[in-house]
Amino acid sequence: MIHISEQIAINEDEICEEFICSSGPGGQNVNKVATAVQLRFNVTESVSLPDAVRQRLICLAGKQITQDGVLIIHAQRFRTQDGNRQDAMQR
């Protein structure tokens, strides 16, 4: 479980994590190693979120949420998978 607040927790099975090649500085390593992370969370089908929280998240997410209701978080600030994974989860 990923604890968002005292009242809200999301089951880890509801989050899809994918590592992709990152853009930006890093020399040749940036083309060889998939260090950026992309998290996908289906807001509309989540059983973890109360309806009020779901509606608020959809309103606040803006362009980060697809028409299908999938929230996409992309993190590539760090040069390591672990750093980017932690950065994405914090968001």
Image (cartoon, helix red, strand yellow):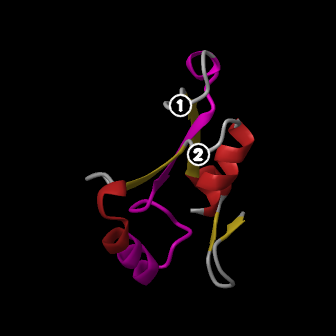
Q: Position of residue 21 (x, y in %)?
A: 54, 26
Label 1 sits on a secondary structure element that is loop
Q: Nearer the viewer, residue 90 or 7?
A: 90
Q: Residue at x 45, y 79 (%)?
A: 53
Q: Residue at x 58, y 45 (%)?
A: 77
Q: Is 80 on the left-hand or right-hand side of 26? A: right
Residue 42 in magenta stretch: yes
* Depicted 11 relative to depicted 20: above or below: below
Q: To which quarter of the image does residue 18 belong?
A: top right
Q: Which mark is residue 22?
A: 1
Q: Position of residue 35 (x, y in %)?
A: 63, 32
Q: Position of residue 80 (x, y in %)?
A: 71, 36
Local packing at callout 2 (Cα closer than 10 Å; few below 14, some 14-19, many 20+) is some
Residue type beneath disc 2: Arg
Please give the residue where the numbered disc 2 appears in the rendered image. 77
Secondary-structure class at tag 2: loop
- The three-letter amino acid code for the residue at tag 1 is Ser
Q: Residue at x 36, y 72 (%)?
A: 60
- Estimate the x, y position of residue 64 in percent, counting from the top left: 36, 56
Q: Is residue 66 left or right of residue 83?
A: left
Category of crowding for the residue at label 1, using alpha-carbon neighbours closer than 10 angstroms: few (below 14), some (14–19), many (at least 20) = many
> Horizontal placement of 26 versus 60: left or right?
right
Relative horizontal placement of residue 77, taking residue 40 as reference (left or right):
right
Front-lying residue, 41 or 73? 73
| Circles 1 and 2 in contact, beta carbons < 8 Å | no
- What range of the chain is rendered magenta? 29-57
